[in-house]
Image: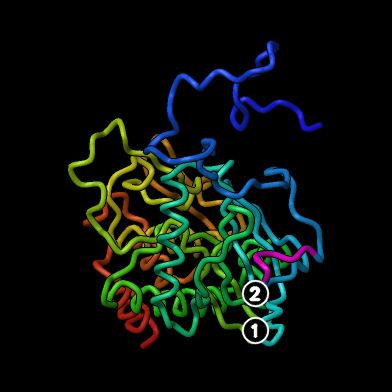
Amino acid sequence: MAPYDPRMNAPYQPLGFQVPTPFPPPGGMAGPFRPPMGPPKLTFHPGQPLPEGTPLATRFEILERVGEGRCGFVYLCRDVKGDNADRVVKTFDPRRGDQKDEDLFRREVRLLGKLTHPRIPRGYGIYDHQGMLCAPQTFIDGEDLADYVDRRGALPEAEVVDILRQVLVILRDLHEGQPSILHRDLKPENLVRDPDGQVWMIDFGSATDAYQEKRDVPLESITTNQTLGYASPEQVMGLESYPQSDLYALGATVLFLASGVNPIAHFDGRLGRLQWSCAMSDGLRQVLTAMLKLAARDRPANAREVLSMLDSFRE
């Protein structure tokens, strides 16, 4: 005999007859009231990665976990419905984030879906896995610059300048595109060097195509989630970002490549500026000094201007 369910059965009466329910079914519907179905129940632990071989969103097979963000894991997967191509799949678990986090996740997918840059991974939309969002992207077979420097140590200037030029070209195309896009989280971990020496820009989770999205926003509602040592002063304060904000972060990244340590280690609090002593040419030092000015208006206006500075020192 099935257990008594007050949502499905009339009230239990020991005298053998039923008393009508005190309230009719909502909307005049006949039959017992059935509550609306909620979203699919996530049956896996939010803090534990799914094991290798797990089917993801009925399309991808997990090969390995390659990272973890605040709101989900990142997997290397095989696209079993797409010629078995390798994909990086970022996930958003609603148990680990709020609506703002989900909006940022969806914005990254939207931006990557519009970008066709040869050094930026392509996005392939959003898939659902038991209520968890999955965003597949192009898999870049390479090593991020943080691991690259940790393995090799500070890089020679010729290699530093080559990386700087490559990233400046990507930023130039992003900033001058329609719409213009700011990355807002440039750092060594978000730049990947492939076996051919080509540099790719990844992780557009903080990117935006709305420059003035924080204008007229109440101060108490502003939040910031930036990387120590690489975020520009205006970003650290939770204020608007500009193309010069990306240039600051790139300058800090180049300082890391040249010195092998986090740029915050070069900051002199008494002087209120970065002071570094690692060996570099006067030309590169002048470029970095310009990119790392504390005030955004004192930095070069755009990536094209920095490229021109590099060209003038080479001549």
Query: How packed is label 1: few (under 14 Cα within 10 Å), some, or many (20 or more)?
Result: few
Q: Nearer the viewer, mark 1 or mark 2?
A: 1
Q: Point out the stretch of residues depicted in magenta.
A: 54-58
Q: Residue at x 65, y 74 (%)?
A: 87
Q: Which mark is residue 87?
A: 2
Which type of secondary structure does the marked residue at label 1 adopt? Answer: loop
Residue 293 can be seen in this image: yes
Q: Residue at x 25, y 58 (%)?
A: 211
Residue 257 horizontal/vertical position (percent): 57, 64
Cα distance, mark 1 to mark 2? 10 Å
Q: Is residue 52 left or right of residue 14?
A: right
Q: Is residue 56 magenta?
A: yes
- Camera-side residue of 21 and 159: 21
What's under tag 2, amino acid-wise? Arg
Q: Residue furthest top?
A: 15
Position of the N terminus, as image quadrant, is top right
Which type of secondary structure does the marked residue at label 2 adopt? Answer: strand
The relative height of residue 43 versus residue 141 in the rendered view (above or below) is above
* Contact flag, marks 1 and 2 (Cβ < 8 Å): yes
Nearest to N terminus: mark 1 or mark 2: 1
- What residue is pinned by disc 1? 82
The relative height of residue 84 versus residue 204 in the rendered view (above or below) is below
